[in-house]
Amino acid sequence: AYLLHVQGSGRIKLPDGNIRAIHFAASNGLEYNSLGKLFVDEGIMTKDEVNIPRMRSYFSEHPEAIKPMLNHNPRYIFFKWGDEHGPKGSLGETLTPGRSIAIDQTILPTGAIGYLVSRKPVLNKEGDIEYWVPLKRFVIPQDSGAAIQGAGRVDLFWGHGVYAEAAANHMKETGKLYFLLQKNFELPEKIR
């Protein structure tokens, strides 16, 4: 449930076994506080160490920490049922795995064509990262999120499945993002 609140959409398994998509409907308007940042601030993990699998492992070993640490984030997301085509971004369009990115929409242009240069993980049979390979592809900013602030942060939507989850959990890579813009496009004051 925590990851659904961070991601803003996803799929849930109902008691009858059916899987349904849910999408962001609204929030309580409170500020987002990152669980990963809390792990770092509390000295539990370093910034380089913190990721979803390590946080899950920590909570398995320290179940008493789950409730107080999850309650550190006062932001609450409300959901609505979605269609089965996949999660929708803040532009109302279905996100495309490996191509849709979330950005700070006060700084970067939504809907523009971007070119992302970074790297992505290659997994072994156990789902662990074996090594990294170059990632170079066209992307489209179709989403936003409370944790995505500033020009130095984007999130790539990986989709669903084992690889998508592992890639999303481990992807904290540096990279470059180029946009194809009109000649007369005026950059926001924040990034000039």
Image (cartoon, grey):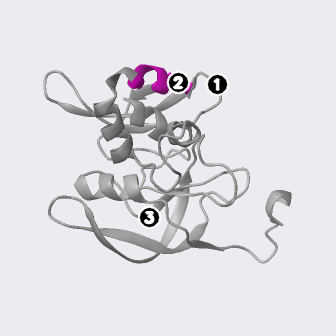
List the residue tagged with mark 3: 99
Residue 16 is at least partly visible in this image: yes
Q: Which residues are magenta?
A: 65-73
Q: Mark 3 Cα within 10 Å, few/some/many (few <14, many 20+)?
A: some
Q: Which mark is residue 30?
A: 1
Labels in figure, total: 3
Q: Earlier in the sequence, mark 2 or mark 3?
A: 2
Q: Which mark is residue 155?
A: none
Q: Is residue 82 left or right of residue 27?
A: left
Q: Earlier in the sequence, mark 1 or mark 2?
A: 1
Q: Position of residue 128 (x, y in %)?
A: 25, 60
User: What's the amino acid at mark 3?
Assistant: Arg
User: What's the amino acid at mark 1?
Assistant: Leu
Q: Position of residue 12 (x, y in %)?
A: 28, 32
Q: Position of residue 169 (x, y in %)?
A: 38, 52
21 or 93, which is in the foreground? 21
Label 3 sits on a secondary structure element that is loop
Gap between marks 1 and 3, in whole Å?
30 Å
Q: Quadrant of the C terminus?
A: bottom right
Magenta stretch contains residue 142: no
The vertical placement of 125 against 116, above or below, is above
List the residue tagged with mark 2: 76
